[in-house]
Image: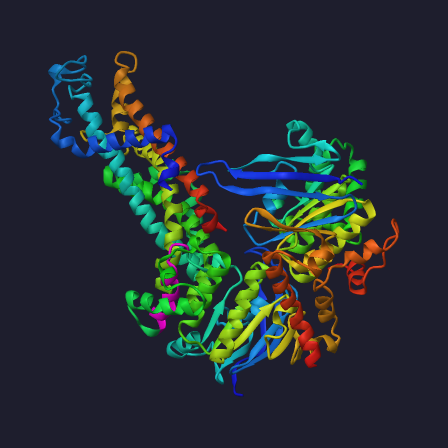
């Protein structure tokens, strides 16, 4: 699957970009950057210099440093969300698909309730209930998205349940647990992985959006959405303060989308998509 | 009498390296009003040989040699538009898996209309007449509800008959059936084969039939061609090949076929 | 011969429609009685969609009948406790029609055959895969094939792997659900020979489900015809079944392809005059809706 994916130049570029961003994010504390949270009003809104490669923001904090440290929050939080979603939804969806009957109906009705609400509104509601802050943003976005994945997982499990190789495994005496782990999950995993990758961009925008509205990450924690929110008032005077985090979000979201698309195409080609969904 | 379809020295290869020859030096013809059967195991190149005729080779494979004559004219170097016009009207196909040839969200009738529109038939009444006639030809005259049904509501056999109806609708001179009955049970198979044979006789149509089953060849063929590993192993009139096969491959296939048929006769004797 | 598997009055319905729409349930099995004795090969023939595979799945314990019982060794299969059900499973194995779909593409042939060995004999993965090698040889493959993935096998070879898997736990009965229907004629012949050899050597009881009469003939001790959701007729051989005259068996017989070419006779007739068709072909053409 990997070989097919890396064929296209733009995919290679996206992967390279994401690897660079990832490397920067992980190694941020050791890059010798100025403290992203250090307020220095004397140097506020400074132009780019040797000391501050991209200048400073309205509180004198180094913009580049905030961008790089911010990536840890923006991207890291999305991975945390995805881990929660994939884990929980796979469990819930598999349970519903396998158990069938009343359990399935009950779980699906719960999913329906969650799915009825527009995601941002629901997220805002949860933040309102849980309070602001990064952990609560992560929880809120997880709660708004899990239902969709659970449905998809359930659909795949339902279609796989009646496939001959699962029936054959049952006749061969395989326990229900082993059935799920050995036969169902391996077909499920690539599917869910691709969907999750395609969703990364979308979720980053949610985190940034909520933070931009002041509902998510609280100052002084650096995060791209917060940076955009802070820079709003300077849109005419210092537009670059908006541009840098905006571009960062744009480029990373696009890279993840391209990667997700390529993964889905590769999955399609290798027939695994068909196989799991047939 | 010159043949309706003549294929000389066909050569099909894979596109990507390493280049593999899938069909090598294959020649056959189909006469108007007669059936030519290509028989062979999976992977012998029989499907590729017949897909080359209307220029419908799958991706990753291409024709690299040979000549195809249809009604005496060269087909292999014809312009794409000319080829498109021929497909569905002069040369029609029925394929193996009926379910995958129908779009599940469109009704049966829509499929008919689509084909008619593509070949310039206009007007609801003209279309309706042709659709009714086509459906009647394959035995659906008493079943008007079929038109509004969706593909998933029909059995494999019914879908295949519908596909045949669409294929025959524009009065083709050549019908290509690529393992058209391999996915059907024996009763559905017999029905579809009878319909193809009846259409052949009535319309003086040429039929190119691909199958792995010698029983189907016995039922349908006038001319028989056995393929193995991309080449023609033996070719001739069907009764000659059955009576006196010369190649090992043909003999093996005939032996297996004979054994299968003998099982029923043995039983009869025991009873 | 003692009765091994006995299905009595089995009904199976498939409910259609969703939460708010009640559609007519599909009554596939309407009171099926079928008995398979030890060491006996029973053929089950009928049109596609008549319920043969459904009955096969019920007999295998994969689907619970809505009414009726399935007895194994005189005891109700679906009322059995864990241990007894496991014993039943071990003794009644299956080979499916869809060869590619019946194996997990991410497991090697050895692992596929090892699965029942691990489950029923409690062997470790390594031991079980080693045990699978001679089993693969018994079905005509090579011991080294145990390390190959399904993609490396042809249809016929993969079906042999499935047969090896079915035979691994040394069952008393095997259900062959259209096991040769998707195979090429030559491959089909070889696999049928293998099945016959295995049957003769091990005295296995078989339920041979097929829509093709030729495949069942000469292999089975008894042949049952399924039509309209019940066993319509049951005789000692296909020929005897044919003699019984049930309309469903007539249809099946008429559809069997001929053994000798038909059209050579046509050429002998004068040009332009449509030849009289052989009786069974003519009957097929003028048949009412399928």
Query: The C terminus of chain C appears in which quarter of the rendering?
Result: bottom right
Q: Toward the viewer: B160 or C269?
A: C269
Q: Is A250 in the magenta?
A: no
Total label count? 0
In the image, is B79 to the left or to the right of A145? right
Residue A16 position (above or below residue C141) = above
Q: Which residues are magenta?
A: C105-120
Spot the residue most to the bottom.
C1
Q: Looking at the image, can residue C117 be seen?
A: yes
Quadrant in which residue C285 is drawn: bottom right
| Residue under the image location 76 percent in, 52 percent down | B197
From the top left corner, tell me how far across and down residue A102 is, in percent: 45, 61
Color scheme of the displayed model: rainbow
From the top left corner, tell me how far across and down residue A98 is, in percent: 42, 60
From the top left corner, tell me how far across and down residue A184 is, in percent: 39, 56
| Residue under the image location 58 percent in, 77 percent down | C42
| Residue under the image location 19 percent in, 22 percent down | A64
From the top left corner, tell me how far across and down residue C251 is, in percent: 73, 66
Q: Toward the viewer: B217 or C247?
A: B217
Q: Looking at the image, can residue A222 be seen?
A: no
In the image, is B198 to the left or to the right of A250? right
Q: Toward the viewer: C112 or A235?
A: C112
The main secondary structure of the magenta stretch is helix
């Amino acid at each position: 699957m990997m070989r097919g994916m890396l064929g296209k130049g733009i995919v290679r570029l996206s992967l390279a970009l994401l690897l660079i961003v990832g490397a920067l994010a992980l190694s941020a504390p050791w890059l010798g950057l100025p403290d992203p949270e250090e307020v220095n009003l004397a140097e506020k809104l400074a132009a780019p210099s040797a000391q501050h490669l991209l200048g400073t923001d309205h509180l004198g904090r180094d913009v580049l440093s905030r961008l790089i440290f911010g990536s840890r929050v923006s991207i890291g939080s999305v991975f945390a969300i995805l881990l929660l979603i994939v884990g929980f939804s796979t469990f819930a969806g598999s349970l519903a698909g396998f158990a069938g009957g009343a359990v399935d109906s009950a779980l699906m009705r719960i999913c329906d309730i969650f799915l009825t609400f527009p995601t941002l509104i629901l997220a805002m509601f949860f933040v309102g209930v849980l309070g602001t802050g990064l952990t609560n943003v992560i929880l809120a976005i997880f709660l708004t998205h899990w239902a969709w994945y659970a449905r998809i997982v359930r659909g795949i499990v339902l279609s796989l349940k009646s496939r001959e190789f699962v029936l054959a495994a049952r006749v061969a005496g395989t326990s229900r647990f082993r059935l799920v782990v050995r036969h169902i999950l391996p077909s499920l995993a690539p599917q869910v992985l691709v969907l999750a990758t395609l969703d990364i961009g979308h979720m980053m925008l949610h985190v940034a959006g909520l933070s931009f509205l002041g509902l998510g990450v609280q100052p002084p924690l650096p995060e791209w959405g917060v940076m955009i929110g802070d820079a709003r008032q300077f849109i005419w005077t210092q537009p670059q303060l908006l541009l840098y985090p905006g571009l960062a979000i744009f480029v990373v979201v696009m890279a993840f989308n391209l990667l997700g698309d390529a993964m889905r195409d590769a999955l399609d080609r290798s027939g695994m998509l068909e196989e799991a969904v047939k | 009498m010159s043949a309706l379809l003549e294929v000389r020295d066909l050569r099909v290869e894979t596109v990507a390296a390493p280049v593999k020859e899938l069909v090598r030096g294959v020649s056959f013809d189909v006469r108007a009003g007669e059936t030519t059967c290509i028989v062979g195991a999976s992977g012998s190149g029989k499907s590729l040989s017949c897909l080359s005729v209307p220029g419908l080779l799958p991706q990753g494979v291409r024709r690299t040699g040979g000549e195809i004559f249809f009604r005496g004219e060269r087909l292999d170097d014809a312009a794409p538009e000319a080829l498109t016009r021929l497909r569905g009207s002069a040369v029609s196909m029925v394929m193996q898996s009926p379910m995958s040839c129908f779009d599940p969200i469109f009704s049966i009738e829509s499929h008919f209309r689509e084909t008619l529109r593509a070949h310039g038939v206009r007007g609801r009444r003209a279309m309706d007449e042709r659709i009714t006639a086509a459906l009647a030809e394959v035995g659906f005259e008493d079943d008007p509800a079929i038109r509004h049904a969706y593909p998933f509501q029909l059995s494999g056999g019914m879908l295949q008959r519908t596909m045949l109806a669409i294929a025959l609708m524009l009065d083709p001179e050549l019908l290509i059936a690529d393992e058209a009955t391999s996915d059907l049970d024996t009763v559905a198979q017999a029905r579809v084969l009878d319909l193809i044979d009846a259409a052949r006789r009535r319309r003086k149509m040429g039929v190119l039939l691909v199958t792995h089953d010698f029983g189907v060849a016995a039922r349908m063929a006038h001319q028989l061609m056995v393929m193995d590993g991309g080449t023609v192993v033996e070719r001739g009139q069907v009764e000659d090949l059955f009576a006196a096969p010369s190649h090992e491959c043909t003999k093996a296939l005939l032996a297996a076929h004979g054994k299968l048929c003998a099982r029923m006769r043995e039983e009869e004797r025991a009873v | 011969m003692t009765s091994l598997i006995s299905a009595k009055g089995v009904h199976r319905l498939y409910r259609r429609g969703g939460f708010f729409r009640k559609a007519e349930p599909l009554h596939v099995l309407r009171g099926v009685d079928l008995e398979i004795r030890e060491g006996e090969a029973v053929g089950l023939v009928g049109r596609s969609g008549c319920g043969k595979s459904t009955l096969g799945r019920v007999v295998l314990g994969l689907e619970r009948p809505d009414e009726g019982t399935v007895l194994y060794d005189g005891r109700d299969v679906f009322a059995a406790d864990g241990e007894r059900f496991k014993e039943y499973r071990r003794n009644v194995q299956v080979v499916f029609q869809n060869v590619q779909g019946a194996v997990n593409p991410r497991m090697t042939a050895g692992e596929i055959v090892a699965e029942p060995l691990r489950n029923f004999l409690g062997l470790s993965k390594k031991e079980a895969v080693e045990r699978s090698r001679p089993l693969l040889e018994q079905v005509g493959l090579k011991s080294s094939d145990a390390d190959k993935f399904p993609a490396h096998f042809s249809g016929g070879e993969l079906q042999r792997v499935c047969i090896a898997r079915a035979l691994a736990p040394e069952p008393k009965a095997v259900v062959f659900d259209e096991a040769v229907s998707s195979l090429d004629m030559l491959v089909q012949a070889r696999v049928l020979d293998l099945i016959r050899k295995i049957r003769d050597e091990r005295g296995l009881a078989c339920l041979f489900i097929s829509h093709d009469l030729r495949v069942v003939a000469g292999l089975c001790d008894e042949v049952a015809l399924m039509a309209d959701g019940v066993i319509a007729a049951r005789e000692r051989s296909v020929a005897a079944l044919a003699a019984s005259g049930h309309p469903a068996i007539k249809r099946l017989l008429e559809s069997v392809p001929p053994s000798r070419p038909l059209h050579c006779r046509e050429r002998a007739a004068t040009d332009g005059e449509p030849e009289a068709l052989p009786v069974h072909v003519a009957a097929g053409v003028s048949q009412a809706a399928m």
